[in-house]
Image (tube, helix red, strand yellow):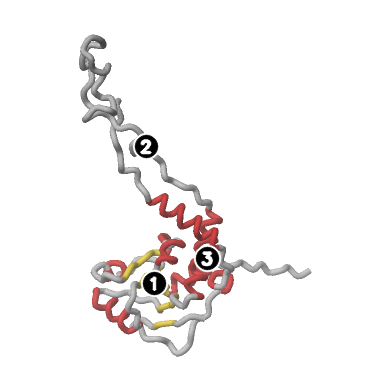
């Protein structure tokens, strides 16, 4: 059970019960570690790039004749040993940092991240609300007594994201954007009630009724 807040951020007298298959799941540290590594790798872009000798300008003619000068023999000034020449073994933008994570691993990582949030008392639930202004969200956060960073999870945008843009410590995620990494890094997670119902329906264990003969 976790705390339930009303639309104004006031704590309700009764707590809300969560699905044990999601919020009390066994945590596999290795799986979460692998997921976070893959997630961060997939956010990475290959922006760093150095030109090799085939990409730099110059070259064309031999710098001096092969013999008779007393100097070392050289061909193109695109060589890496020349100033302005190509770079050997430098970073290139054709590197691929992408890591594959299958659907089952994503699902299990999200369930385990939610379980960790629940066990560490940083997860709460709030009734659905549709703020119109920034001060509406600020008032709710103040009434909840949360002073550190806060992540709201909503089913769909109904004003919460737009009203939270100017609040530094508040982040808003739609259910389709939710992932294990965002839950793990969040200091506090507040799930809107309709989003919690959808999470329970999608991730919860499904019980099949036995047919009676």
Where does residue 123 sit, x and y in percent of width and height? Answer: 44, 75
Left or right of 33, for residue 53? left
Circle 3 crowding by C-alpha within 10 Å: few under 14, some 14–19, many from 20 = many
Mark linked to residue 187 = 1
Mark linked to residue 94 = 2
Residue at the spot 53% in from the left edge and 54% down from the top edge = 103
Mark linked to residue 151 = none
Give 128 or 50, whichever is nearer the viewer: 50
Residue at the spot 37% in from the left edge and 49% down from the top edge = 44
Left or right of 45, for residue 19? right
* Callout 3: SS: helix
Q: CA distance from mark 3 to mark 1?
A: 17 Å
Looking at the image, residue 116 lies above or below residue 94: below
Where does residue 71 sit, x and y in percent of width and height? Answer: 23, 17
Q: Which residue is mark 3?
A: 111
Q: CA distance from mark 1 to mark 2?
A: 36 Å
Q: Are marks 3 and 2 in contact (CB under 8 Å)?
A: no
Give 16 or 72, whichever is nearer the viewer: 72
């Amino acid at each position: 059970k976790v705390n339930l807040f009303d639309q104004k951020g006031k704590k309700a007298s009764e707590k809300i019960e969560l699905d044990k298959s999601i919020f009390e799941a066994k945590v596999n540290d290795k799986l979460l570690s692998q997921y976070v590594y893959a997630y961060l790798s997939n956010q990475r872009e290959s922006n760093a790039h150095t030109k090799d000798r085939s990409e730099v300008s110059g070259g064309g003619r031999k710098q001096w004749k092969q013999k008779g000068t007393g100097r070392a023999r050289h061909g193109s000034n695109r060589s890496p040993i020349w100033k302005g020449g190509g770079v050997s073994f430098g970073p290139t933008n054709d590197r691929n940092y992408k890591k594959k994570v299958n659907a089952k691993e994503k699902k299990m990582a999200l369930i385990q991240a939610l379980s960790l949030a629940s066990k560490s008392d940083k997860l709460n639930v709030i009734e659905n609300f549709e703020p119109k202004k920034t001060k509406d969200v600020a008032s709710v956060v103040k009434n909840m007594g949360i002073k550190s960073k806060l992540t709201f999870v909503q089913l769909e945008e109904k004003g919460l994201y737009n009203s939270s843009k100017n609040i530094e410590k508040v982040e808003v995620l739609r259910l389709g954007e939710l992932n294990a990494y965002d839950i793990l890094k969040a200091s506090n997670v507040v799930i809107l009630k309709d989003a919690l119902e959808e999470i329970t329906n999608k991730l919860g264990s499904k019980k099949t009724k036995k047919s009676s003969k």
